[in-house]
Amino acid sequence: MAKTLYDKLWENHVVRQEEDGTALIYIDRHLVHEVTSPQAFEGLKLANRKAWRIDSVVATVDHNTPTDGWAKAEGTACIDDEIARLQVDTLDSNIRANGALAYFPFKDARQGIVHVVGPEQGATLPGMTVVCGDSHTSTHGAFAALAFGIGTSEVEHVLATQTLVSKKSKSMLIRVEGALGKGVGAKDIVLAIIGKIGTAGGTGYAIEFAGSAIRGLSMEGRMTICNMAIEAGARAGMVAADDTTINYVQGRPFAPKGSDWDKAVAYWRTLHSDDGAQFDKVVELDARTIQPQVTWGTSPEMVIGINEMIPDPAKEQDPVRREGMERALAYMGLNPNTPIAGVPVDKIFIGSCTNSRIEDLRQAAAIVRGRSVAANVKLALVVPGSGLVKRQAEEEGLDKIFKAAGFEWREPGCSMCLGMNADRLSPGERCASTSNRNFEGRQGPSGRTHLVSPIMAAAAAIAGRFVDMREVL
Amino acid sequence: MDKFVVLDGLVAPLDRANVDTDAIIPKQFLKSIKRSGFGPNAFDEWRYMDVGQPGQDSSNRPLNPQFVLNDARFQGAQVLLTRKNFGCGSSREHAPWALLDYGFRAIIAESFADIFFNNCFKNGILPIVLPAPVVDRLFMETLATPGYRLVVDLPNQVIRKPDGEAIPFDVDVSRKECLINGWDDIGLTLRHADAIHAYEDRRRHEQPWLYNK
């Protein structure tokens, strides 16, 4: 019988299955960061259990770490926030006590956002199950892997047993066909998908993204798409393996070598949905109709094209939705039936596990080159996804372009995506952000977040307001 | 984990869709390395007029009188009634830890986000999905009836209302069993250690690159 990619990944990892479908699923790669792991390591210790296969663990710090001031003191002593420093130090001592396949501690040249570091190191491979105590683990599905976020109890469960208790999800195919318009990229595709199916549209599903527009994307672009599967409600998003996937993986530190490589590639070539495979749901998008996207509200599904008007709650029939829209507009300080283009911005954030890879920085730099950040913009931040992304960008001179324009060029980490460190919005500030969540308070209490692509964020920095950057491209 | 069998609890109505885990427990509290003590900061940004900080004593902070959980009627509530897609966003288990520490043992909604739903079961909280019209009715009755309580009977998979009406609900068999017995998932899984070893032996042969460093 014809199988979906998800069928193949699932079946390959079933250790045992109960009659009601509850299965024990084997986990190949366990990514660990400082925020969601301390209680899991503590639980393991209290129960006097040992890690099942510590070689599956790749760990780094990202959520809490500052993106500047690294030189002012040795090691973690430069982290001013004592509670944050304790959490970073706790991961350090937990890894020292338990081990890991790889650990990139604070200030290591390879440290960075766990979802950037894993693929970059070749620690994320096609056909793997990849988990992490972080919802954006869906990112790794771009490699034809089954990757999803888990809670801390499950982090402990994976540490102790190398498995998870799970039931198979339903399958959804999202097919995006056609050529993308000028200035439209992976971020716009995924925001348009979320706008279409809603933030709960993928709940209970594993999503496969397919179609010519997806196949045409680089691995960076595919990661951006899978990263935000969770914003569509799906724990896992994935893309079939092809030459783009295999070429990206080849030669990376933890990629297979020698005869292992050939065997692996032969297997990876099978990681696609078979012709005629059945999905529980199919959604189609025409890539040619996707406009550059901007969110206007406090949920990623509240999104429109840069050429559109902010919607009017009065036209919404469903009372719960209407109230949600009214609350969002009040929170965001926006008026219905007015254009989103022209809305002025206070801060710019280019970074996060969605958009902090080299391609994202190149796209933003291409807009910024030779221009200056507008006077009304209080802060424009570029936070590379990892130390290696930062180094490569510097080798290409991108840092100089950003700095010459008035951007700050920071050290890697999650930064203003969630504002656990010092990078955040003040109340009422409006931000063009390449991150993934525009929830109330996400980037700082009473901060206002608009999710956009790196190109859109760069153009907003230059103009000081949202603009249809296709006019300047 | 505390057992969940039958709960007779006061109901608090949180009439919002898409309540995300950032709202349930804001980021600054995630710096803790403990799994307890998050209750005073559940819904922190909605609940208080000031911005909360980790380690702060919240007992004297100014409360937001507009926020429903601050209403005297709903103090001591153990059942949270809410709308669709509750718990969306971040996978932070701090969200169910905060709700549990606040006092909630059952959450009724039209739908839940997957990761949050899963995290609830690991912490002795029962998330219950009911159809929108039923949730609507429960909202109306909760608001109209001071001291409105529901009896959540997990063994019989039924919610009993004050007027005697019984509302059946679905729950996964194995999750139900774990909740009723307060079982530790890891202990249960380790009973299958032989199967895990056998799986690994087969994989080492079939896909050696996953094991070779």
Image (cartoon, coloured by chain):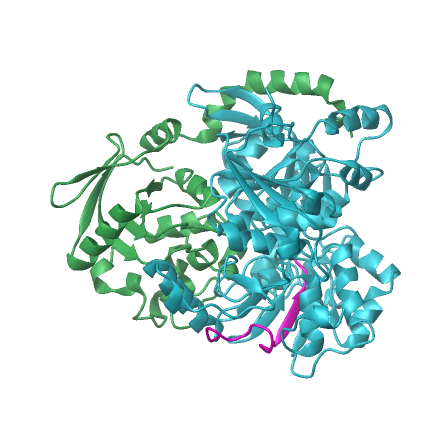
Chain colours: A cyan, B green
Residue at point 60%, 67% (across, down): A306
Residue closest to the far left: B163
Q: Main secondary structure of the magenta part?
A: loop
Residues rendered magenta in the picture? A334-354
Q: Report x, y in % for residue A30.
A: 63, 37
Q: Give the quarter of the image for residue A465.
A: bottom right
Q: Give the quarter of the image for residue A98.
A: top right
Please give left or right for residue B77 compared with residue A140 in the image.
Answer: left
Q: Report x, y in % for residue B204.
A: 71, 20
- Give B87 or A187, whichever is nearer the viewer: A187
- Give B51 or A149, whichever is nearer the viewer: A149
The reply to whether residue B51 is in sight is: no
Residue at point 66%, 54% (across, down): A288
Asked if B194 appears above or below B67 in the picture, the reply is above
Query: Is B138 part of what is drawn in magenta?
Result: no
Q: Report x, y in % for residue B46.
A: 39, 65
Asked if B6 appears above or below A361 in the picture, the reply is above
Please give left or right for residue A85 compared with residue B85 in the image.
Answer: right
Residue at point 43%, 31% (across, down): B184
Please give left or right for residue B171 compared with residue A162 in the image.
Answer: left
Q: Give the quarter of the image for residue B117.
A: top left
Asked if A151 appears above or below A384 in the picture, the reply is above
Query: Is A344 part of what is drawn in magenta?
Result: yes
Asked if B208 appears above or below A472 in the picture, the reply is above
The reply to whether residue B43 is in sight is: yes
Q: Report x, y in % for residue B22.
A: 48, 57
Please give left or right for residue A278 compared with residue A55 in the image.
Answer: left
The quadrant in which the C terminus of chain B is found is top right
Residue closest to the far bottom: A375
The quadrant in which the N terminus of chain B is found is top left
